[in-house]
Image (cartoon, rainbow, N blue to C red):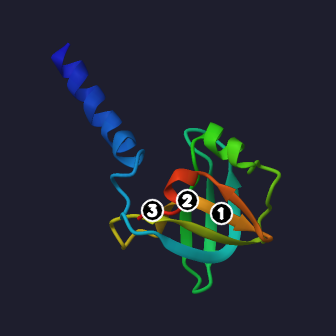
Amino acid sequence: MAGGLAALAVLSAPALAHHGWGWANSEKMTLEGTIKTISMAPPHPSLQVTAQDGTLWQVDLGNPRQTANSGFTGDTAKPGDAITVLGNRNRDEAKAHMKAVRITLAGKNYDMYPERIGSN
């Protein structure tokens, strides 16, 4: 049984490390670019965004309920749309990965985490 629990802990560690905010910088950044792909699949919707410098970013949105509550759905945007993302980037700056607090498309804001917009 102890071996099974240890294996479960090892296998779940990446998922636990990925969720929440511990992996992200506390300061927010703004990413401007073009949507390459949209995924609404669990555990959280995400976008791939090509930045103006050509870097491909992984942008995690809120959990499915938060994302839906923001008004963003799989039909809200399409690949090729211009987007601005306010959020927190990965602490490992070698990774082009961030968690969105707000996304803006065609002048409309979709707030995933409204309580985090004004704070660092």
Element at badge 1? strand
Reading the chain from its start, which is encountered first: label 1 or label 3?
Answer: 1
- Residue 89: quarter of image: bottom left
Q: Nearer the viewer, residue 45 or 109?
A: 109
Residue wearing tag 1 = 103
Residue 40: horizontal and vertical position, in percent?
68, 45
Numbered badge on residue 89: none
110 horizontally vs 28: left or right: right
| Disc number placed over residue 119 in the picture, else none | 3
User: Is mark 3 in CB contact (under 8 Å) with mark 2?
Assistant: no
Local SS, label 3: loop
Q: Residue at x 42, y 45 (%)?
A: 19
Left or right, 2 with reference to 42: left
Residue sitting at x 32%, y 35%:
11
Does the residue at mark 2 contact the one at mark 1 (Cβ under 8 Å)?
A: yes
> Which element carries disc 2, helix, strand or loop?
strand
Q: Which amino acid does the dot numbered 2 rest on? A: Ala
Task: Name the quarter where the N terminus is drawn.
Answer: top left
CA neighbours of label 2 inside 10 A, class few (<14), some (14 to 19), many (20+): many
Q: Amino acid at mark 3?
A: Ser
User: Which of the two marks, 3 or 2, is nearer to us in this view?
Assistant: 3
- In the picture, the disc for residue 100 is 2
Query: In the rendered image of this protein, does residue 73 appear above or below residue 3?
Result: below
